[in-house]
Image: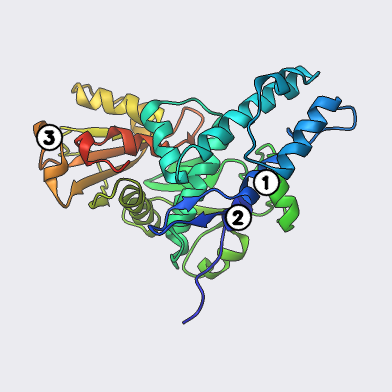
Amino acid sequence: MSAPQDFWLASGHHLLDRDAAGRLTVTDEFLKAYLARPELVPPPEACAAERRLHAALLAEPRRSVASAEIAGIADADARENWQVMIAWRDHLVAHDTLEAAYLAIVRRAIRFPHLFIEQLVQLILRNVLEACEDAFVVRAAELLFRPQKVRASDGVVIATDAETAPAASPHPESPLYLLLGVQTPADVELLSEANAAGYWARSDRFDMALDLTSGGRGAAALADIMRRWLSHLLAIDVAIEPLPRLDGVAFNWYVGLDAEASRIGEMLWNGDALDDDARSQLVGLYRLTFADPSCMMEKIKGEPVYLLAATTADDVLRLKPQNLIAGLPIRLEEAVH
């Protein structure tokens, strides 16, 4: 049997361990990777206090950091960077797994930089997809941690990574990209059966577009990754299927997968008619059903849940996987801690 495909090397997943249940655990090597970020590497003009702190954490990345150590750093921007980083590190190491750390962020609405949370989502997804051989599912998973530029015309919906789409501004390369020699994205290509085998080698470039048209491989793949996400994090068994249209849908419960979708969902919930702009922004509609309805809240037990995805006015799709965790009508005692 051949080894599973490797992908998203720059995420740093190879620096993590797994516990007996297959969940990700933090290692010192993983924590040291954060210390390689350009925001934390002391520049030549850095003060002695900043240099001492950086060196001490490289030697012992879990060591306690007193507030006075950060307060002693001369540069105000550096102090802020270190405050954020230590708070993030402390949150990660306070939990047994990265999955538990993520669930705590969602359930307690803890505020951390979007970049850190998106990296955390990517790592958990990489774990979820460890043995996945379907490039369409892995590409669809990118939608949960990377904004997409969407083109919709005549019922066809194409999503391109917002940072690799033509005319997009370049994103600063991470130290892991530089370390692993991952090249800056260049040409964007639509993922298809013909070129799917080439996805794995270029997965860190995020330069393959995905067809999300209802009824196609991409829409089904997004439904699949959302199902896997919920199974891994909440240990619930659901079926998710894309729907081609809103007609005949009774919105007893919905989850907006992004801010715009939540706004549109509220309109539908209230029975308001959607204008042309709102209809054009709605690029995804999914029906979720529970294999075991007994885990659902009593008032909605047995009813389907509808998931909506919508673009902003400038055609950007920013899915929020935390909405799936927080928005489902499940009894709190059923959630995995």
Residue name at image x 19 percent, y 47 percent: 289
Q: In terms of sequence position, does the residue under pointer 1 or pointer 2 come before the other?
A: 2
- Position of 332 compared to 74: left or right? left
Secondary element at image label 2: helix
**Image quadrant assignment for residue 260:** top left
For label 1, the crowd category at 10 Å Cα-Cα, with few meaning under 14, some 14 to 19 and many 20 or more, is: some
In percent of width and height, residue 287 lies at: 23, 45
Amino acid at the residue labelled 3: Ile
Q: Quadrant of the image for the C terminus?
A: top left
For label 3, the crowd category at 10 Å Cα-Cα, with few meaning under 14, some 14 to 19 and many 20 or more, is: some
Q: On residue 250, which mark appears?
A: none
Circles 1 and 3 in contact, beta carbons < 8 Å: no
Residue name at image x 65 percent, y 38 percent: 168
In percent of width and height, residue 285 lies at: 29, 42
- Position of 26 compared to 334: left or right? right
- Can I make out residue 177 in this image? yes
Mark 1 or 3: in front is 1
Please tell me which residue lies in front, 22 or 186. 22
Secondary element at image label 1: helix
Q: How many marks?
A: 3
- Can I make out residue 147 in this image? no
Q: Which residue is mark 1?
A: 33
Q: In terms of sequence position, does the residue under pointer 1 or pointer 3 come before the other?
A: 1
Amino acid at the residue labelled 1: Ala
Q: In terms of sequence position, does the residue under pointer 3 or pointer 2 come before the other?
A: 2
Q: Which residue is mark 3?
A: 300
Q: Residue furthest right?
A: 44
In percent of width and height, residue 190 lies at: 53, 57
Circles 1 and 2 in contact, beta carbons < 8 Å: yes
Q: Which residue is mark 2?
A: 15
